[in-house]
Image (cartoon, coloured by chain):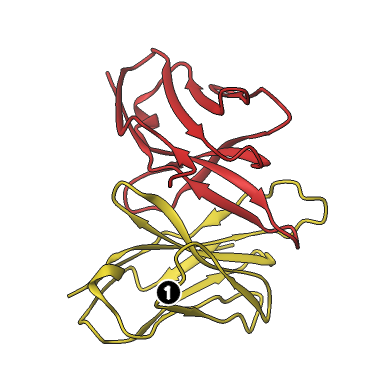
Chain colours: A red, B yellow
């Protein structure tokens, strides 16, 4: 059973508009939630994270919102730019003994930002 | 500073063959991990290591072996390749932490493996 779900495989947005990517999770024990961005033929790169004790984190054009009661998080990109076109992975982190962060990934959402 | 490097970039194997995917990092990170990415499934953890000489299983460890003899290197071995192991493999590294805070995982560029 998938613990982290991204139900939208793709999203198309016009340049300058807001992109909203959604993610749901089932395990209330997750400590952190993260978004990774991936371009073709490259590894994922870290974008933004949020602790489970917060409900919002902002970094420039990127904001992540966490709704713990609904077990839902979302990534807002404002304004969207063509260079944002990539696959976005939602991930949840569970900290193991020894401090290792085990990441559970969603299936990804492919964002296309068109002029 | 090269970050996380992986070799080879591409590999084609026949069923039953063995091979080793190489991963190295030059950031002096304690933690290293191997993931596989399959269509519609995101990335899944195969094995991880919290330091030299210490490894443990992730979600999908069957058919893979790892070892960590140095801080820098974390090779992944396929003992007898199967078509189900066709995937893109990513290695990642991160700093250790003593306070259970989150430390970013840095990913390599990946190895695309096809098993015929």
Q: Report whether B25 appears left or right of B79.
A: right
On-image quarter of the C terminus of chain A:
top left
Most extreme residue toward the left is B116
Q: Quadrant of residue A22?
A: top left
**What is the count of numbered marks?**
1
Q: Report whether A108 appears left or right of B99.
A: left
Position in image of residue B63 (x %, y %): 39, 77
Name the residue rendered at 50%, 78% in the picture: B75
Q: Report whether A97 appears left or right of A14.
A: right
Most extreme residue toward the top is A17
The local crowd at label 1, few if under 14, some if 14 to 19, many if 20 or more residues have their Cα within 10 Å, is few
Instruction: Name above or below for residue A36 compared with residue B80.
Output: above
Position in image of residue A55 (x %, y %): 67, 22
Most extreme residue toward the front is A1
Frontmost residue, A7 versus A21: A7
Name the residue rendered at 58%, 40% in the picture: A27
Name the residue rendered at 54%, 72% in the picture: B24
For numbered disc 1, what is the local secondary structure?
loop
Instruction: Name above or below for residue A91 compared with residue A64.
Output: below
Position in image of residue A107 (x %, y %): 38, 43
Name the residue rendered at 29%, 50% in the picture: B39
Find disc 1 in the rendering and name its residue. B62
Frontmost residue, A22 versus A112: A22
Position in image of residue A53 (x %, y %): 73, 30
Q: Quadrant of residue B13?
A: bottom left
Q: What is the chain letter for disc 1?
A: B
């Amino acid at each position: 059973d998938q613990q982290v779900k991204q139900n939208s495989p793709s999203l198309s947005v016009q340049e300058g508009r807001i992109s909203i990517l959604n993610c749901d999770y089932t395990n209330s024990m997750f400590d952190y939630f993260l978004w990774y961005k991936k371009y073709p033929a490259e590894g994922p790169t870290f974008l933004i994270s949020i602790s489970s004790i917060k409900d919002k984190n902002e970094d420039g054009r990127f904001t992540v919102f966490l709704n713990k009661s609904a077990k839902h998080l979302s990534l807002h990109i404002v304004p969207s730019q063509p260079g944002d076109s990539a696959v976005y992975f939602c991930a949840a982190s569970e900290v193991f003994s020894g401090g290792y962060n085990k990441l559970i990934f969603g299936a990804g959402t492919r964002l296309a930002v068109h002029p | 500073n090269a970050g996380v490097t992986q070799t080879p970039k591409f590999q084609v194997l026949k069923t039953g063959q063995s091979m080793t995917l190489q991963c190295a990092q030059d950031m002096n990170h304690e933690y290293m991990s191997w993931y596989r990415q399959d269509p519609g499934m995101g990335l899944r953890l195969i094995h991880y290591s919290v330091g030299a000489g210490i490894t443990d299983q992730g979600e999908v460890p069957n058919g893979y072996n790892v070892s960590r003899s140095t801080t820098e290197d974390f090779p992944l071995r396929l003992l007898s390749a199967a078509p189900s192991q066709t995937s893109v493999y990513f290695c990642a590294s991160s700093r250790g932490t003593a306070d259970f805070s989150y430390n970013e995982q840095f990913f390599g560029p990946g190895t695309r493996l096809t098993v015929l």
